[in-house]
Amino acid sequence: MDTLLTADIMANSPRVRRRSSVYVDAIHDLPEKEVMAPAQLYSTESGRLFHSGRIVIATVGLPARGKTHISVALARYLRWLGVKTHVFHLGDYRRATMGPGTDVPKDYFHINASPSSVLLRNKILKKCREDIFHFLDHENGQVAIYDAVNAISEGRRALAKEFAKHQVQTLFIESHCTDERIIEDNVRNVKISSPDYKGWSDELAVKDYLARLSARIPHFETMEEQDLHWVKLINAGERVVVNNCAFGYLSQRIVFYLLNLHTKPRQTYFARAGTTKHEDSYKADAALSEEGKDYARKLTERLIKHREQERQALIDRGGPENALVPMTVWTSTRRRTIETGQYFAKNGYAVIPRSQMSQMNPGVCEKMSEKRIRTEYPDEVIKHEADPYHHRYPRAESYHDLAVRLEPIILELEREQNDVLIIAHESVLRVLYGYLMACNAADIPKIEFPRDEIIEIIPASYNNEAKRIHISDVPENIIPGSPENISIPVPPSVPPSVPQSGAITPLPLPSGAGTPVSGSQSPAVPEPGSRPAGTPFTVPQPLNLKDTHIDPSS
Amino acid sequence: MTRTPTGDLIRPNRKTNGVGVQAEDTRICVVMVGLPARGKSLIAQKVTRYLHWLSIPSKIFNVGQYRRSETPAPSASFFATSNPEGERLRRAAAEAAVNDMIKWFQRGAGLIAILDATNSTKERRRWIQNRCAAEGIQTMFVESKCDDPDLIMSNIREVKATSPDYKGQDPEVAAQDFLARIQNYEKVYETIDEDELDLTYVKLIDVGQRVIINQIKDYLQSRVVYYLMNLHIKPRSIWLSRHGESTFNLEGKIGGDADISERGEAYARSLPDLVRRCGDGRKLTVWTSTLKRTIQTARFLTFEKLEWKALDELDSGVCDGLTYADIEEQYPEDFKARDEDKYNYRYLGGESYRDVVIRLEPIIMELERSENILIVTHQAILRCIYAYFMNVAQEKSPWMEVPLHTLIKLTPKAYSTHEERLKADIPAVSTWRGKGSSAKHAEPTDEERNSMGKNVGSGH
């Protein structure tokens, strides 16, 4: 990545950070080379998939139309499919060039800008474009997403022409709003997370933003160019016009994804299902035990309380009475997850069972102890340890199989307007979390979901944030357990270290507990909280996440 | 999307279909809209075939067929708006089709119905929308709009002159009558416009040059739109061939990444000539898998070549490199289980046919978009691709005989896919094994051949 950014931009672009932890949304990290993406079906030597060439996706639209959100969401999906994608936010380059606290000249966006503004504009554009070419030419990049306003038809033509000279196709995506409410909502959302307004008061930020819409960018031409490739999303996807886009599988696939995308903010919560009477059996599809029912009640109470606190906080900040969007609960069709959701149903929430969210099939490993698996399938264990994400035990599913099976759920999750609580098996939570936080495939089998925590994913246009909500009084013995899981080498979750003050705990240490060290001496059942000596942390210390929306640049 | 009512918690644990399409809550009526000769029936058929291939039950309700039972060979004047009798009969046909469709949904027979008719007025579309809404069925209107006279005329010549309405008539007279019929429709035709913004619709303008998509309500609808956008109606063919005989074929082993045998090499050398004989000089693109035997087989062809990982042979897991006899001996239960449900059987650590269909989906989409393609691939892969184009049922497709050293040419037509087979005069072993038969490759008997080949010959 260092080749991509000059030092000054690097210094001022905190968003572009190295992949550091599964607890940080890695969508702005550069894709790593030679690593299969979570749902990638095949790989090619060039690294380019679907026999599509290289594509630049250029956004078109005035500020507060959700361009950044669309760019980031699309990058997330394309990377999930294994397409090497990177987002280039022109705003980042603008800020990096200007330095902190300095704004661009007032006429920066004007057609008849002063020569010095034009010079500045060209300098910033050139830098961004050079980085795009570098990514495509030297980093095996396939799709570069160029997040900018691209307001004028003439400029768009010139852009497409320049990329065409380098054998790169240009696909424009315009976000067009005729509904003022959507724009206002977007302003509200963008001002919270955009670094442009770091340190501004809410009121000033909104005012400035609205002023910017009319004054800073007085000229805007919606896309009508017959000869260019473009997609126009009207009112956040209510209506979509696709022009001349039949130039590749990938372009059509992008349109397919955009059909399911919306730009309204909403939360996703993850929670484990309760424990059952027959923990070790996959086929039995057992009902919840008394302990499991007790857990389900506590989970329900905790989340409802949390949402009430959130609502109150929003009202205190001047939000309306119905400040929260409604919440829907999704479970798998397995009995334990449906029964865990029943207390939500009793409280009036819609609970929808979804068959694709069934846990990973353990195949022949069902009801087997780790020791027995090691004895009976020593070769499989070696293969599994080499690639726990892609390996499947006989008759079992791999995480990769699960990811491919979950793709429709991911699109439905993008489509959903309500907040969603997902109650599912840990294997399913891992894969969905991996998508939302752009995790490496290799990290996904290791992500932990202890039962005494609800994970909340807060979307923002730049990147998603994860936060954990502690559930108190969950019996120690059921916190880590995932015994119905393939017991090796995917470890059951360990309990969190020490709960911190307040309801929100820090993320648990990503422990290697339970991961067998090569050889066969690892303990069959790890002591809670223990970590085999000598196992280094594979992931650095996670961030401590606060109870609020977090400015990622802080 | 219909929501499960709160409280209705435990529902039957339905199997997901192969692609995991979340289809269980959704019933959709796809309503075709467009003047005659705009490719509506073609689209309707392709969509059902695609949905079948993905294990989503669907059916076409063609209003023309209902009307034909009353008026077998009408002249253009029947379609004049000034002809009240014609108008009444056409209305009755539409009602009969919609009634049958609703009954079909009520029986739980399927998830997607396609109502194939011109549906050319706002009033008619509103009526369909209301009928479906009353039954909790979503509607999705698909309009094919095209004003290119050449495209329309070529469609008329190719399709309509052979339509049941013109059976036994002079094709030129038939075409002229058909043009007159279209003119009658044009008088009342209303394209889908701003008045209908509350409807879910897709408007395909000039064969996908521009597409307008309005109010897509759920994932399954978006998936159908995605497929529609990949379709084109330019005439083309697809050629399918297995790799030349491999050394593994000679030993009766499955899987692996073996070289082609001497006879396989001879097939590879003869392939350019074989393609020339049935390719009428068209420029093709060659797709192979990433395995040696397909790349070696295609290497004398002078066209552009692409290697697809997705075209690699079905992964036979632990059985890779074994003969059927070995498998029967080492994994007797698996050998039997595979015979019982070959489509769903997944080799230990490997793949099932269902798995292969999922991974081939991008290939099918790309094939729909492309023009003339020659695919050199493997037995199981070829069966799945063939099943898509020829609408072969899942119980049958894994058992089809696809002999070595044979070039298959498929030409999609409006109402079916036309098939030609060209055998190279180079002997090869058979790699076919009948259901429940002994653990060795065999030549199918004539009777077996008949039961797999002849009843799958049409795209219907």
Image (tube, coloured by chain):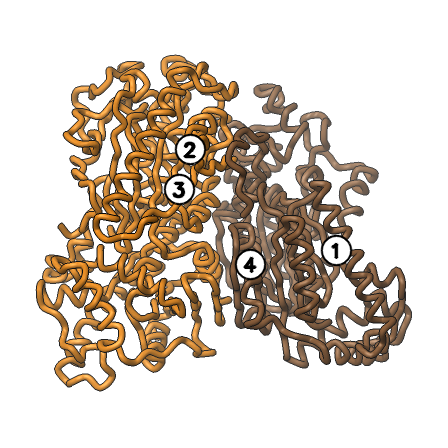
Nearer to us in this view, A62 or B379: A62
Q: Which mark is residue A347?
A: 2
- Amino acid type at circle 2 is Asn
Q: How far apart are the two marked residues, 1 and 4, measured between alpha carbons? A: 22 Å
Crowding at dot 3, Cα within 10 Å, few <14 / some 14-19 / many 20+, comes out as: many
Q: Are marks 1 and 2 on the same chain?
A: no
Q: How far apart are the two marked residues, 4 and 3, measured between alpha carbons? A: 28 Å
Where is residue B434, by image quadrant?
Answer: top right
| Residue picked out by circle 4 | B225
Rendering coords of residue A12 (x, y %):
12, 59
| Residue picked out by circle 3 | A327
Q: Please, which chain is the residue tagged with disc 3 on?
A: A
Closest to the camera, between mark 1 and mark 2, is 2
Q: Which chain is orange?
A: A
In this structure image, what is the colour of chain B? brown
Q: Is residue B130 left or right of residue A205?
A: right
Q: Secondary structure at mark 3?
A: strand
Closest to the camera, between mark 4 and mark 3, is 3
Q: How far apart are the two marked residues, 1 and 2, measured between alpha carbons? A: 40 Å
- Amino acid type at circle 1 is Val
